Amino acid sequence: MAILFSPPLPSPWRFKWALLLLSLVLPLTLSACAAERVTPPLGCAVATTPCLSGTAKVALQTSRGEVILGLDGKAAPLTAGNFVDLVKRGVYDGTVFHRVVREPMPFVVQGGDPISADSKVAPSDYGTGSYIDPTTREARLIPLEIGLKSEVRPRYGQPLTTPGITRELRLSHERGALAMARSGDANSASAQFYVALEALPELDGRYAVFGRVTKGMDVIDRIQQGDKILRATVIEGGTLVKGEP
């Protein structure tokens, strides 16, 4: 599995950041081909998954209380559309928050692994699953999607690591940011997501932010590893389309 690289940081924070960044990528064991390959066209125009037109609000009923998520279909139509589609399918109901990292500094609350809703799956395996499409019986994977303020359509498939990229992004890793977890392969996101507990500029341009917590951040702050999403529901917006919104 590829390891996430980050710019040098002053000691001792450099070592601490390395541990935190590894904690985000290590739980996912999605396979990736080591050989170089030509990247096919990516984005809503060619996606087999639906894209979000406009915005959406999603309510997460958790074992600690309710969290409201605001999704941005303009900045991240494919990523937000995938999330809304999975919510409507009931994929997140009963899933576990399998990774909560608050030490040595606040990092993320991560959940949404479909296999964590299966009582027969060992907790040690949480974080290794993807959404399996019932039609194809294959894992649904979506490409990395990064929207820039200066561009109409998002970019797909490759991390953006230009210094100062945070200032150019439509959506960045501020506290409460909602983003997709993935393996070392930039195009391996599926169902797992995380909420940033603090601003995480080291992840900007590398992971797809597609919304934020608009209500209930205090609930996120109380979530412990092993807590559950009892139910996820679209409560506003959520119009899904095939092709460009």
Image (spheres, grey):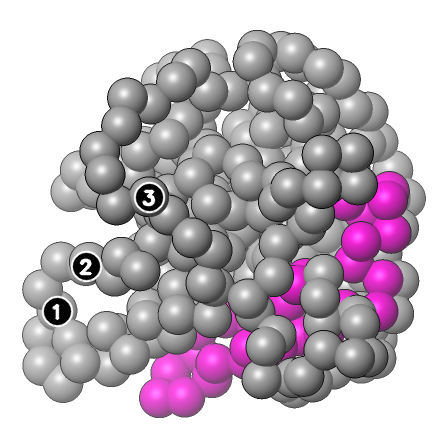
Q: In this view, does 152 lie to the left or right of 241?
A: left
Q: Looking at the picture, which amino acid does disc 2 mark?
A: Ser
Packing grade of label 2 (10 A; few <14, some 14-19, many >=20) is some
Question: Residues in magenta?
Answer: 86-113
Instruction: Write down the residue under mark 1.
Output: 9
Q: Looking at the picture, which amino acid does disc 3 mark?
A: Cys
Image quarter where the C terminus lies is top right
Gap in Å between the C-alphas at discs 3 and 1? 31 Å
| Position of 84 relative to 107 (above/below) | above
| Secondary structure category for the residue under label 1 | loop
Q: Residue 6 carries which label?
A: 2
Q: Residue 151, how many percent across, how many down? A: 39, 16
Gap in Å between the C-alphas at discs 1 and 2? 8 Å
Q: Residue 193, how many percent across, how many down? A: 59, 57
Image quarter where the N terminus lies is bottom left
Identified at 87% across, 52% down, the residue is 90
Q: Residue 183, how many percent across, how many down? A: 41, 56
Of 118 and 244, nearer the camera is 118
Identified at 23% across, 38% down, the residue is 35
Q: Residue 109, how many percent across, how many down? A: 57, 72
Q: Is residue 217 magenta?
A: no
Label 3 or label 1, whichever lies nearer to me, is: 3
